[in-house]
Amino acid sequence: MKELSHILDVLEPAEALAAITPELKKILAHLDDEARVAFVTGLINEPGDDKISSMVDL
């Protein structure tokens, strides 16, 4: 895992995403829909986002 982190650290963000996308697709293919949605949502949402968006609706 340290090796992967080191490799990704030296790449530009777009290059790092391009490098991990094919492998990530393989991993996500083995998950059910709920697990995939939870993973992607976890990438997008910061802790506490729900509270903030609820306050905006007020």
Image: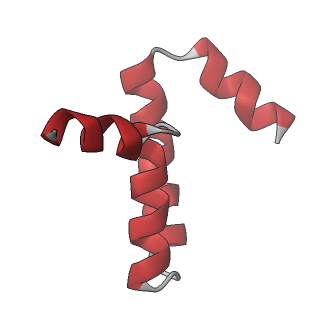
The quarter holding residue 18 reads top left
Which residue is at the front of the view, 30 or 18?
Answer: 30
The quarter holding residue 9 reads top right
Number of numbered tags placed on the structure image: 0
Which of the colour schemes (rainbow, by chain, secondary structure, one colour) is used?
secondary structure
Where residue 48 sits in the image (x, y, percent)?
A: 48, 38
Looking at the image, residue 9 sits to the left or right of residue 57; the answer is right
Relative to 27, is 42 above or below? above
Relative to 15, is 32 above or below? below
Residue at 61 percent across and 26 percent down: it is 8
Where residue 25 sits in the image (x, y, percent)?
A: 43, 64
Residue at 53 percent across and 39 percent down: it is 47
Looking at the image, residue 16 sits to the left or right of residue 3; the answer is left
Furthest-front residue in this view: 58
Which residue is at the front of the view, 42 or 57?
Answer: 57
Residue at 27 percent across and 44 percent down: it is 54
Q: Quadrant of the N terminus?
A: top right
Where residue 55 sits in the image (x, y, percent)?
A: 27, 36
Furthest-right residue in this view: 2
Q: Quadrant of the C terminus?
A: top left
Where residue 22 sits in the image (x, y, percent)?
A: 43, 55
Which residue is at the front of the view, 44 or 58?
Answer: 58
